[in-house]
Amino acid sequence: MQFKRILQQYQWIVLGAVFLCVFATYVKLRFIPFYQDIAAQNTQLNADEKLLKNPNIPEEPMEDSEYLSGELDELNKVLVSAAGQADSFKQRLAPIDSQEVLLKISEVARTSRVKVVQNLPYLVQRRVAIDEQTGKISNKKLSKAEERKQQQKLRKQAKRARKDTQKYGGVVGALTREGELMDKLVNDFEEARPLQEVKVEGPFDNLKVFIEAIHALPWQVTIVKLDVDVKDQQKMPQGLPQLLSAKMIIGM
Amino acid sequence: MSFESFLEKITTFNTIDHVLVCEASFTGLRATAVNKKGDNLTVAQEVSSTQFELGDAVADVMEQLRQKGWKGQHVVLVTPAVCLTVLDLNIPTNNKLPIAQMADSMQWEMEPAFNQHQRVMLIGQLLQFYGHLKAAELEEVLHKQTELANAKGSAAVYKVFGELAREMFGVKQADLANCLKRQKWFVSESEGIKCGWRALKHQPLQAEGVYKWLVAGMNQGLLREWQAAFAKYGAQLEACYPLVGSGVTPRSEGKRRVEPVVNAEQHMQLELHHGVIAGVALEHGDPRQIQTMSCSQDTLLTHAAELYQLLGADQMQSITLIDSLSSTTEQAEQHKDDLTNILGCTISKDDKPSEKVSVAMRNAALHFLDASQLVNVVSVSAHEPLPPVMQRFAVRAVLAVMALFAVIVLSETGLYLSQFYIQAKSNSIAADVGKIRDSIKRIQDEIKKVDTLKAEIKQKKLEKKQADTIVQLVSKELPQRNDHLLQILKALEETVTEDLVMEKISEDTILGFKLSAWSLSEQSAQEFVKYFQIAIHPLGFQVKDMTITEETGRLGLIGYALNFSITLLNDKEWNLRKQLGNRPISSLPANVANTLR
C-alpha cells in the first residue's frame, strides 16, 4: 500500500512514531552518553578547580624512607641474630611429636618411686592468631569486640576439643591467662609447646626427687603448675611418711 | 526563493526539470519542450499542428516530439479555454478553509465570469477568424438568429448559427465542420468548472472583509478531454494556464527573483492573441481587472481603445504590449506604433522569447518548473487541488524533520559548546593541577613507602620480640621456674618443724603458691612463716594474706590453721591481679592493663 493512500491521521501517527524512534535513538545513543561524558568532565573540572583553590597537599612524612630502610636493614641483621639465638635455644626443647620425653618422665617416676596416677596430654587453646600467609604469629591487634568474638570462638573450640579429649584421652585445660608460663609456652611459639598433666603419688622426698629428676632431663622440661595435697591423711599408719598427691602440668 | 516555495520544492525533491508547454489557439496547437538547467530554461524541441480535431492535433504534436527525441512526461497547456479573473471575496487570504469548500466557493463565484469568457469562443468568432464570415455578415447572422428566436408562431423555426451562416452567406459545410471541431478545443457542453486560485499580494485597505483573489477556471469536461488526449501518448497533463493573463509578471532577465517590469501604481497590460484581445489592469504589479474580447485584424485597434477606456484610461500610468499575434518584428512594431497613436501614451513591449514560443508559454513553463518565480500566475491543476503549502502533510512532515534536525543541531551545538568550554577551562588549569597532583602523588607514594617500611619494621620488631621472648623464656624463665620450685621444696623441707603439718600446696599460675598448714601452736606457725619467708625471699617471693586461725587438727588436737600465699608479684600487681580474677587483662582499662603486661 502506498503511503499516500493511508488516511492522513495514520500518516501523522506513522510520522510521529518515526520521529519518536529517531529522537529516542538519538537521545539514547548519542545525547545521554555525550551528556554523561560532559558531566564527568565537568565534575573533574570542579574537582580540579577545588584542588587549585585548596590544594590540600598531604604533609611530607616525618620519617625519612632512606633512614627507615637503613633501620630495617639493621633490624633484619639483628633479627637474623636473634632468630639464630632463638633457634639454638629451641634446640633445648623436646621434639613436639616425640614420645621419648613421656617415656623419660615415666622412667623418672619409676626411679623416684612415685606412682604415676595419671599422665595425659593437657590441651590448651591458643590465644594468638597465626598469619595464614607467613605461618607466623600475627601482630594484628584485635579490637575489644574482635577479642570478645575470639574468646567465644575459643570457648566453642575448647568445648569441641573436650569432646575429642573424651574420645582420644586427654585433659582440656582452661584458657590461659596473659603472663603465665603456660600461656607463653602455648602462644609465644609458632607451634604451641605440648603440655602434659601428670598426677603422681608418693612421699615428699620421692616427690622432690621426681621433680629434681624431671628438671635434670636432657630437654628443657618445666613444671608450670604444681598442686600438692595430702592423700588419705587419716588412713596412714603412724611413723610412715605421709603420702602426697601431686598434680602437675609439665611444659615440654 | 521564499521559504514556502522552498518547502514546496523540497517535498517533490525538486526532481521535475522538464515540461512540454502546449498552446492551443485558434490557429492550432503549438508545443515546446522546455528543460531546466539550474536557473535557466532552454527550449529543446518545438512542434506545431494545424489539425482541427483535438485528438488528432495532440497525436500529431506528440508523434512529432517523439520523433525528435522528446522523452518527457509532464505537459502543461496554455489555452483560451481557461478563464482568468479577479474576484472580490470575503474569504481571508490566510484562511484555513478545507480545500473542497474553497473549490466550491471559487467555482460558484467564477461562474458568471466564466460564462462571459465563453462568448469569446463562439462559432461566429471562429468563422470570422478563419475568414469564412466578415464582421458585417456575422452581425447579420446574429441579427437573423435573434429575430428567429424572438419570432412567435409556427412559422418561426430556431436555427443554429452555423446553419444560418451556411444558408445566408454560403459558408461551406467542411469549413463549418472544421470550425466546430476547433471550437471543441475551447468549449464543452459538460458542466462543472475546475478552478485554481491565489490571493493577491496587495490587498486594498479600504474594503475591509473583502479580499482580492486571482482565479482561473476551466470546464472540467474539457480538461479531462485534453488530459485523455495526452495520456494516450504517455504524457501527463499537469495543468492548464490561461492564454490571457499568464504574462502578467514577465520575467526580468538576469534576476533570480522575478519582479514586475513595471512598478507603476496603475499599469495596463495589453495582450494580442489570435482572435482574442485582452487588457489587464495592474496595480502595484497585481492584476485588478481583466477584460477579454474577440477580435479580428480589422477591429484590433478599435477593441484596444475600447479596452483602454474600460480599464480606466485616465488612471493608467503606463502600458505594456504583449503581442502574440504578430509573426514578424515589423508587424509587431507597426502594432505598437498604431496603438501608441490611438491610445496617446507610451507603450513598452514585452517581446516573445522566440517565434514559436509566446510569453504565456514561457511563463507557464516558468511557473510549472519554479512556481516561486511567478507569483501572479494561476493555473488550473489537472490533479486534485492541493491545500495551501503550509497545510500539506508532506510540508509539515518536512518542517517537523527540520525541527527535529534543528533540535538535534541545537542540542549538539550546546553539548559541543559545553564540552569546548569545559575543555578550555580544564586546559587553562591543567598545568597547575598537574603539578599539584604530581606533588600529592609523590608525597602519597612517600607516605605509602614509609608506612610500608614502618609496618615491616613493626613486624620485624615483633618477630625479634618473639625471638627474644623465646630466648628469654627458654634461657631464663623456664630454668628459673625449675629453680624456684626446687628452692621452695627445699625451703619447706628445711622450715617445716615437728609441730607443723603441711596440708596443701596449690598454685595459681599468676598469683603464685597458696600454702595451707596446721600447727600445734601459734608460735610455731609464725616461726614457720618467718623462716620460710627468709628462705624464699632471695628468690623474690613475698608472703601475702597470711592467716592463723585456731582449728582442730589431726588426732582431734586443738591447733592453728595456717594459710598464706607466696608470690613474685609486687603489691600493686597483686591487688590488681586479685581484682582481675580469671578475666583477661584486656578487660581492664588500657593504662591499668599495661601495668600487668
Image (tube, rainbow, N blue to C red):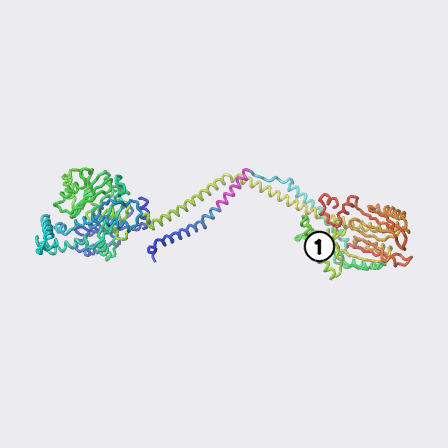
Instruction: Residue B475 in the image: state x and y as whole percent.
Output: 78, 49
Instruction: Residue A207 in the image: state x and y as whole percent.
Output: 85, 55
Give, as a three-letter code, the residue at label 1: Arg
- Furthest toward the bottom, the residue is A167
Q: Main secondary structure of the magenta part?
A: helix
Q: Nearer the viewer, residue B96 or B180?
A: B96
- Furthest toward the front, the residue is B153
**In the image, is B63 to the left or to the right of A195?**
left
Residue B417 sits in quarter: top left
Q: Is residue A43 magenta?
A: yes
Instruction: Residue A233 in the image: state x and y as whole percent.
Output: 87, 57
Of the 4 image quadrants, the one containing the N terminus of chain B is: top left
**In the image, is B167 to the left or to the right of A235?**
left
| Chain of the residue under the numbered disc 1 shown in the image | A
- The magenta stretch is A37-53
Q: How many marks?
A: 1
**In this figure, which residue is indicated by the disc labeled 1?**
A155
Q: Nearer the viewer, residue B258 or B452?
A: B258
- Secondary structure category for the residue under label 1: helix
Residue B464 showing in the rendered view: no
Q: Nearer the viewer, residue B196 or A195?
A: B196
Q: Is residue A235 magenta?
A: no
- The answer to whether residue A72 is above or below residue B166 is above
Instruction: Residue B139 in the image: state x and y as whole percent.
Output: 10, 48
**In the image, is B362 to the left or to the right of B470?**
left
Residue A165 showing in the rendered view: yes
Residue A113 sits in quarter: bottom right
Task: Report crowding for label 1: few under 14, some 14 to 19, many 20 or more residues within 10 A (C-alpha).
Answer: some
Q: Residue at x 34, y 55 (%)?
A: A7
